[in-house]
Amino acid sequence: MRAIWKGAVAFGLVNVPVKLYAATGEHSVPLHQVHKADGGRIRYKKVCSIDGDEVPYADIAKGYETDDGRMVVLTDDDLDELPLATEREIAVEEFVPAEQVDPIMLGKTYYLEPEKTAAKPYALLREALKTTDRMAVVKVALRQRESMAVLRVRDDVICLQTLLWPDEVRAADFPILEADVQVRPQELQMASSLVESLAADFDPSAFEDRYQAALESLIEAKVSTGKTVKVATAEDEDSSDGGEVVDLLSALQRSVEKARGARGGSAPAASADAADEDEAPAKASRGRRSSTASDTEDDKPAAKRTSRAKASDDKPAAKAPAKKRTTKADDDAEPAKKTTRRRAS
C-alpha cells in the first residue's frame, strides 16, 4: 500500500507520528463508454457554456452560484488562504463510548501506521482505546477539507474513520410511520422464530458478489472466442511512418477515383493532375500508354508507391508540349486549300 497522508495524532502531551493508508477499495470491473460500431472510447471535453470554447485544466476554477444566478469564482489562491489549523495533525477532541457513534455517520476508513520511532506511544493509545471501549473523536484535514472522524481499534491497528457532519445526515420524514400499528403477540412470536432460524455469526467471506463473477466470466468468454475489437490508439495515429503512409495512400486512391469519375472512368490520376482543355488529344494518347503502367503501380507495396509519390511532389511539374493553336480563319481556309490541290492535280 502507498501512504496518502503523513501527520501525527496528538492527544494531551503525547504526539504519535503516523502514515495514513486507504483501508478499503471497490472490486468493480472498470467499464468504459464506447462507440458500439468500432469500440472507440467516448471522450468528454470541458467546454464553456458561454463562448463554446474548450477550456484547459489550468483555466478552470471553482464557482458558487448565488440564488439570483450570479457566480462567485474561487481561485486556488483564494482556497489556499482559508485556515486549516489541523492540516498535518489529527487532534483528539474527546473520548466517547463506542455505542454512542451512530453508524449512519461513519464514512471512509483509513489505517494508521506509526513511524518507527512512535511504536510505543502508538501501542499506548491503542490499548487505552481497547481497555476503555471508547472511540477518540478527532478533527483532520484531508484533501483540503476539514473532516470530523473517530479513532477506533481493529485487530492491532488503529483506524481513522471519517464522520459526516450533523447537517449532512438527512432526517427521515415518513408520515406513515406515525400511525399507530397494532402487532399481535402471535405475529411477533412467528417473526422472532424466523429470526432465530436464520441466526448466525457474521462471516462476510461466506458471501459472494455473483454479478461481479458473472461479468468477469462474460468478459473472459468474449476474449477467448475472439469477440474483441481492435481499437486504434493515439500512438498508432501519431506513428510517423505507418500513419503517414496510410494517410497519403488513402489520399492518392481518392484522387484516382475522383479523376476517373470526372473522365468517365478512363483517365488515370496522373492525367487528372495535368488537366488542361487545350491538351486533350495529347492526354488521351498519354493515358493509353500509361494505363498498363498505372495498373502495375497499384500492385506494388504502399510504401514504395508513397515514396515515389513524395518524390514526384518535390519535382517541378513537367510541362506538356506546346500545341499550335488554330483560329477560326485557319479552319475556314483549310477546305479551300484542299480544293485547290485537287484542281491542280
Image: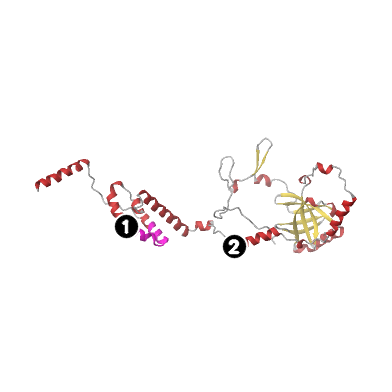
Let me know if residue 215 is in the magenta part: no
- Measured Cα–Cα span from mark 1 to mark 2: 49 Å
Q: Nearer the viewer, residue 241 or 259?
A: 259
Q: Is residue 97 above or below residue 301?
A: above
Q: Main secondary structure of the magenta part?
A: helix
Query: Would you say residue 20 is visible in this rendering?
Result: no
Which residue is drawn at the image coordinates 17% and 42% (left, top)?
333
The residue lying furthest to the top in this view is 68
Left or right side of 297 for 143? right
The residue lying furthest to the front in this view is 186
Provide the residue designation for mark 2.
223
Question: Quick one: SS at disc 2?
Answer: helix
Which residue is drawn at the image coordinates 12% and 44% (left, top)?
340
Provide the residue designation for mark 1.
290
Total numbered labels: 2
Quarter occupied by residue 204:
bottom right
Which amino acid is tagged 2? Val
Which is more N-terminal, label 2 or label 1?
2
Which amino acid is tagged 1? Ser
